Image (cartoon, grey):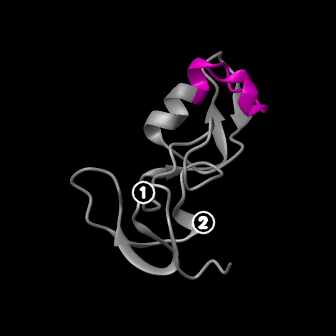
Amino acid sequence: MGYASYTLPDGREGGYAVDAECDLDDCTADIDRGLGYLCGQNPGGHPFGCGGYFCSEHLWLGNVDDGNGGVRWSPHYMCEPCVDKWRAAGGPEDPDDID
């Protein structure tokens, strides 16, 4: 399987050759559904991400306040709701540590 075009678990087309808009409501930024715009590690969702596709304005990576007064490197690109979930879990590195 290549990553240019494939079917996502939710039935939409995914891949870096698939033109799309940011999944955030009211955002019409042009993106593709490649891994560079993916929230989390897997298109079907992952404890560190919802599996949605977001523009660079709505996707986080890097040093993020971990919710405990510290700053941690986030493990994957994440949208804001997923960053909030990660913070609430204390900013763990292991996805099994998130409920």
Q: Is residue 36 above or below residue 23?
A: below
Q: In terms of secondary structure, where does tag 2 sit? A: helix
> Which residue appears at 53% of the width and 80% of the height?
5
88 left or right, relative to 22: right
Residue 28 horizontal/vertical position (percent):
26, 65
Question: Which of the pair 45/23 is nearer the observer?
Answer: 45
> Which residue appears at 42% of the width and 55% of the height?
10
Residue contact at pointers 1 and 2, CB within 8 angstroms? no
User: Where, by quadrant of the figure, is residue 16 drawn?
Assistant: bottom right
**Upstream in the sequence, badge 1 or badge 2?**
2
**Marking on residue 35:** 2
| Residue under label 1 | 57
Range drawn in magenta: 86-99
User: Where, by quadrant of the figure, is residue 13 drawn?
Assistant: bottom left
- Amino acid residing under circle 2: Leu
- Amino acid residing under circle 1: Glu
Question: Which of the pair 68/94 is nearer the observer?
Answer: 94
What whole-number distance in Å separates the C-alpha atoms at marks 1 and 2? 16 Å
Residue 48 horizontal/vertical position (percent):
62, 38
> Which residue appears at 54% of the width and 35% of the height?
83
**Marking on residue 17:** none
Q: Magenta stretch: residue 14 in it?
A: no
